Image (tube, rainbow, N blue to C red):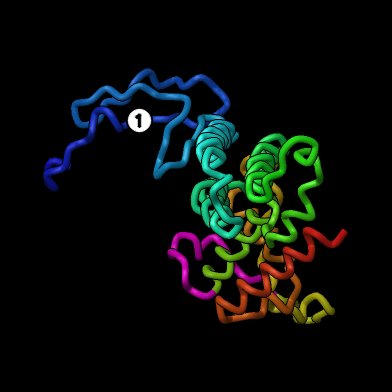
C-alpha cells in the first residue's frame, strides 16, 4: 500500500472471522494497525455477520425502510397514487431489492420481515387504515404488478444467471456456472441444452444459498421458452410475466 501511496482508514477498517465459533484471532496487525475482529461488518452498504445468517442485514433494511415509510406517511394525504408508487420504489423497494441475489437461502422469518415491509408500503399507497389495514395484500400487490419479495429474489438470481451465460457479467461469476453435459444416448431431458450443471447439495443451508448453488437451482426451474432467450429485454419481460403468474396463480 505504501508503494501506491495508500493508507488504511482507522475508523472504517474492520475484520470479521466468519464461522460458528469464537474467533481465535485476538487481533490482526496490518499497516501498523491492530484490527480487532467484529461480529458484523458492512461492505458496500451490505451488513455481513460472522454466522452469515443475514439477520443484521435484514434488520438494517427494516430499520431504514420503516423510517422512510413513517416520513412518507406524514405527507401521504397530499400525494397522488402515482407519486406514492414512485416514492415507494425509490425509498422502500430499492432497499429491499439491494443485493437481494445474496438472499438465496434466507430464513423464513427474515423473508417474512421483508414481505411485511412491502405489505406496509402497499397499505401506504392505497391508504389502507383502520379495519382495511388487515385485508389481504395479494389483490393490491397484483393490481400494482409488484412481485412478492420471494419472487423478486428469484428474478434477480435468474437475471444474473442470464448475464453470466451471455458474457454480460464479471468473469468470476461466469466461472461459477456451466451447462449440463448431455449424454450420447439422449432421453427427452437431454434434448434441452439450456440446463445448468447442478452441484451436489451442501450440508449447510447457508452455504446452499451461495450463487454457485442458488443460480442453477433457480435457472433450471424456469421453462425452456424463457431459458432459450438471448435478448436481455425479452428475457426480463418473459421472466417477470412467468414469475408474476406463478406468484398469483391461486
Give the vertical position of 209 relative to 21 (above or below): below
Residue furthest to the front: 78
State whether residue 204 appears in this view.
Answer: no
When asked about the image quadrant of residue 225, the answer is bottom right
Residue 168 among those drawn in magenta: yes
Give the vertical position of 115 relative to 56 (above or below): below
Front residue of 57 and 191:
57
- Residue 20 in picture, x, y percent from top left: 57, 26
- Image quadrant holding the N terminus, namely top left
Query: How crowded is the residue under tag 1: few (<14 C-alpha within 10 Å), some, or many (20+)?
Result: some
Residue 70 among those drawn in magenta: no
When asked about the image quadrant of residue 180, the answer is bottom right
- Image quadrant holding the C terminus, namely bottom right
- Residue 17 in picture, x, y percent from top left: 45, 29
Q: Describe the element under mark 1 as helix, strand or loop.
A: loop
State whether residue 77 appears in this view.
Answer: yes
Q: Which residue is mark 1?
A: 14
Give the vertical position of 73 relative to 49 (above or below): below
| Number of numbered tags placed on the structure image | 1
Magenta stretch, overall SS: loop
Q: Is residue 188 left or right of residue 111?
A: right
- Residue 207 in picture, x, y percent from top left: 62, 43
Please give the name of the residue rendered at 61% of the width and 46% of the height, measured from the top-left corner: 103
Q: Is residue 222 left or right of residue 78?
A: right
Please give the name of the residue rendered at 61% of the width and 79% of the height, measured from the top-left corner: 234
Please give the name of the residue rendered at 46% of the width and 41% of the height, measured from the top-left corner: 46
- Residue 219 in picture, x, y percent from top left: 68, 65
Q: Give the residues drawn in magenta, as a range.
A: 166-181
Amino acid at each position: 500500500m505504501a508503494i501506491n501511496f495508500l493508507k488504511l482508514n482507522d475508523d472504517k477498517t474492520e475484520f470479521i472471522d466468519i464461522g460458528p465459533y469464537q474467533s481465535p484471532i485476538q487481533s490482526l496487525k496490518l499497516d501498523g494497525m491492530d484490527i480487532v475482529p467484529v461480529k458484523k461488518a458492512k461492505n458496500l452498504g451490505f451488513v455481513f455477520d460472522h454466522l452469515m445468517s443475514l439477520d443484521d442485514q435484514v434488520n438494517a433494511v427494516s430499520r431504514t425502510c420503516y423510517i422512510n415509510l413513517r416520513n412518507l406517511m406524514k405527507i401521504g394525504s397530499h400525494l397522488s397514487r402515482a407519486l406514492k408508487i414512485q416514492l415507494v420504489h425509490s425509498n422502500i423497494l430499492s432497499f429491499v431489492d439491494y443485493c437481494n441475489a445474496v438472499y438465496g437461502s434466507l430464513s423464513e422469518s427474515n423473508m417474512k420481515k421483508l414481505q411485511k415491509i412491502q405489505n406496509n408500503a402497499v397499505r401506504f399507497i392505497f391508504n389502507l387504515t383502520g379495519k382495511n389495514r388487515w385485508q389481504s395484500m395479494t389483490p393490491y400487490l397484483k393490481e400494482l404488478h409488484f412481485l412478492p419479495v420471494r419472487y423478486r429474489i428469484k428474478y434477480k438470481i435468474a437475471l444474473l444467471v442470464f448475464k453470466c451465460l451471455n458474457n454480460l457479467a464479471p468473469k468470476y461469476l461466469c466461472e461459477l456456472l456451466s451447462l449440463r453435459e448431455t449424454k450420447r444416448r439422449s432421453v427427452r431431458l437431454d434434448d434441452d441444452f439450456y440446463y445448468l450443471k447442478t452441484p451436489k447439495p451442501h450440508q449447510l443451508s447457508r452455504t446452499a444459498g451461495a450463487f454457485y448453488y442458488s443460480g442453477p437451482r433457480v435457472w433450471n426451474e424456469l421453462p425452456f421458452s424463457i431459458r432459450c432467450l438471448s435478448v436481455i429485454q425479452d428475457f426480463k419481460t418473459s421472466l417477470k410475466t412467468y414469475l408474476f403468474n406463478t406468484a398469483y396463480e391461486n
